[in-house]
Image (cartoon, rainbow, N blue to C red):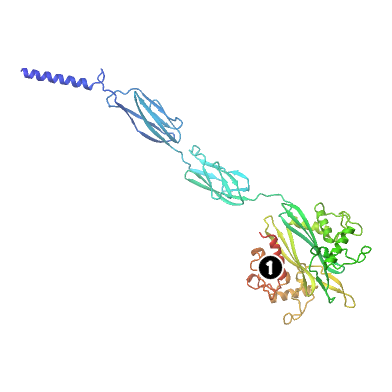
């Protein structure tokens, strides 16, 4: 019995000790060791709410008052009740504090993605100009309110982060506009700025006139040079001719007046002044004596006077002349206005129209003629039109069949058209008789003959050459050195049967002046 009492006493003592060890407070509840917050991470869309649950550790411990704070309430806010409200895209930390214990919850707010993107498909700019790409992104509360911009060709058109496009150089570029997963393209065309110019392009532009000098054929040419849309110089020259040794026709001089210089000898005339004798300018002594004479009497050679006129034209192309036609408005000039002022005005008019001329003095069956090409040049320096032409003439004889002069034709080959009658020759083909092209019947018969025989008149052949050059440049225009005709390698020119030596020469000259053409 006594043993049983001892055993009960031990059990009671052990039970009491256990109760004392497990109790943390007087009311019998366990001590708070930690807090548990769930969920530890939250992902929400803007506008969504998620309540955080806080539990004591151990579970039967008393949970003190809980405080909630957000690291950035503009992204996600949290109420006293632990409800998290997603505001906008981003990531924040919600701090949960209970007593001395703290936990953090990571809250991620998903961005609002674009569902639609509207942009203009094209944009046109001049070099140096700027323009901002307009756009519209849906929905209105989209997170990324500004799309990204990227140019595939910044050397033509560059773009910054705000969508401002700058025209860099003439050409085309694609601007990629991307809003989240949606991508659109804007085609940007950049052009050179339109500059108001007096003259469409820089270069040399000429005008010429065929005339007679004491009955002998000659031509005079005036060229104006344009640089940066301004007239910088004029150039005057003339080429004369003289009777051949047989006295039956005329030959062009080997050099122009400008090229001859003092050798032209405008004042080298016997008794031009008292005591002066005509000098042999082919000798050094004679040339020196002539130059000394000019200096002594204060006279100027033709080329020197031409240079004075060139300088005067920079101020005005209007010259004052007396009744005899002598120029009185330019000091030192004693020559007559042999069409110089008229040609200077014509050269300026050609420059304003973008027309340039290259010519060569040639002969046709021993008689002088002129071959030229007129090219129309655009602002880009490319040819928009080419025309080959030729002016011919014939000697004039008196009743005794002596050559007394020369007469230029009233019309060029282009102006004559079918009236030139290149194939209008007796027995050119069996049964053909030369027609009188001054009559309607004769002209019609000639044209019918050309069609039947598949022959082309001169102007038609010339136009084939220039049409080919406009499309292909001078590539393929190869002349056979023996025949002086095209070598026939280009099928498109198969109908050209004329000799082309001089036509190619003037074309090469004008393309050399405007190589970009």
Q: Residue at x 70, y 58 (%)?
A: 377
Left or right of residue 140, residue 327 in this image: right
Left or right of residue 113, residue 265 in this image: right
Residue corresponding to mark 1: 465
Q: Residue at x 81, y 56 (%)?
A: 310
Q: Position of residue 476 (x, y in %)?
A: 64, 68
Left or right of residue 173, residue 403 in this image: right
Q: Position of residue 251 (x, y in %)?
A: 81, 72
Q: Position of residue 139 (x, y in %)?
A: 49, 39
Tag 1 secondary structure: helix
Left or right of residue 31, residue 405 in this image: right
Name the quarter where the C terminus is drawn. bottom right
Q: Nearer the viewer, residue 402 or 97?
A: 402
Position of 158 relative to 221 (above/below)? above
Q: Nearer the viewer, residue 38 or 394?
A: 394
Name the quarter where the N terminus is drawn. top left
Q: Quadrant of residue 270?
A: bottom right
Position of 279 relative to 120 (above/below)? below
Position of 499 relative to 6 (above/below)? below
Q: Position of residue 485 (x, y in %)?
A: 69, 73
Q: Quadrant of residue 337?
A: bottom right
Number of numbered tags placed on the structure image: 1
Label 1 neighbour load within 10 Å: few <14, some 14-19, many 20+: many
Q: Which residue reaches farthest front?
A: 285
Q: Quadrant of residue 391?
A: bottom right
Q: Is residue 35 visible?
A: yes
């Amino acid at each position: 019995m006594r043993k049983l009492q001892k055993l009960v006493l031990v059990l009671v003592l052990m039970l009491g000790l256990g109760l004392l060890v497990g109790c943390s407070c007087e009311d019998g509840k366990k001590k708070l060791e930690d807090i548990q917050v769930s969920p530890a991470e939250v992902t929400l869309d803007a506008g969504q709410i998620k309540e955080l649950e806080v539990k004591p550790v151990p579970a039967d411990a008393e949970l003190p008052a809980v405080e909630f704070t957000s690291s950035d309430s503009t992204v996600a806010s949290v109420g006293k009740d632990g409800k998290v409200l997603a505001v906008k895209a981003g990531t924040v930390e919600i701090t949960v504090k209970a007593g001395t214990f703290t936990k953090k919850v990571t809250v991620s707010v998903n961005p609002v993605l674009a569902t639609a993107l509207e942009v203009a498909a094209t944009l046109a700019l001049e070099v140096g100009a700027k323009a901002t790409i307009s756009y519209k992104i849906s929905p209105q509360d989209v997170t990324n309110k500004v799309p990204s911009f990227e140019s595939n060709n910044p050397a033509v058109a560059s773009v910054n982060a705000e969508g401002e496009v700058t025209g860099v150089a003439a050409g085309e570029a694609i601007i990629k506009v991307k809003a989240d997963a949606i991508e659109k393209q804007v085609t940007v065309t950049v052009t050179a700025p339109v500059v108001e110019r007096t003259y469409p392009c820089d270069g040399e532009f000429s005008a010429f006139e065929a005339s007679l000098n004491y009955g002998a054929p000659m031509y005079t040419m005036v060229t104006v040079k344009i640089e940066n849309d301004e007239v910088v110089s004029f150039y005057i020259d003339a080429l004369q001719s003289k009777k051949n040794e047989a006295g039956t026709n005329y030959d062009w001089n080997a050099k122009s007046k400008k090229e001859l210089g003092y050798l032209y000898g405008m004042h080298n005339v016997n008794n031009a002044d008292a005591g002066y004798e005509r000098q042999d300018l082919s000798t050094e002594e004679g040339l020196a004596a002539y130059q000394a004479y000019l200096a002594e009497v204060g006279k100027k050679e033709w080329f020197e006077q031409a240079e004075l006129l060139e300088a005067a034209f920079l101020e005005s192309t209007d010259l004052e002349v007396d009744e005899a036609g002598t120029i009185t408005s330019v000091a030192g000039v004693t020559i007559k206005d042999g069409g110089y002022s008229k040609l200077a005005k014509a050269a300026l008019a050609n420059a304003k129209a973008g027309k340039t001329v290259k010519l060569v003095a040639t002969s046709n069956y021993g008689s002088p003629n002129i071959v030229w090409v007129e090219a129309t040049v655009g602002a880009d320096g490319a040819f928009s039109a080419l025309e080959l032409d030729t002016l011919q003439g014939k000697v004039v004889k008196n009743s005794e069949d002596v050559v007394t002069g020369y007469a230029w034709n009233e019309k060029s080959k282009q102006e004559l058209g079918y009236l030139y009658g290149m194939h209008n020759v007796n027995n050119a083909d069996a049964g053909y008789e030369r027609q009188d092209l001054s009559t309607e019947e004769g002209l019609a018969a000639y044209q019918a003959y050309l069609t039947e025989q598949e022959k082309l008149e001169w102007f038609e052949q010339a136009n084939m050459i220039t049409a080919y050059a406009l499309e292909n440049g001078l590539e393929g225009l190869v002349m056979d050195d023996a025949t002086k005709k095209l070598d026939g390698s280009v099928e498109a020119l198969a109908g050209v049967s004329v000799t082309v030596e001089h036509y190619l020469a003037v074309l090469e000259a004008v393309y050399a002046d405007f190589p970009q053409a």
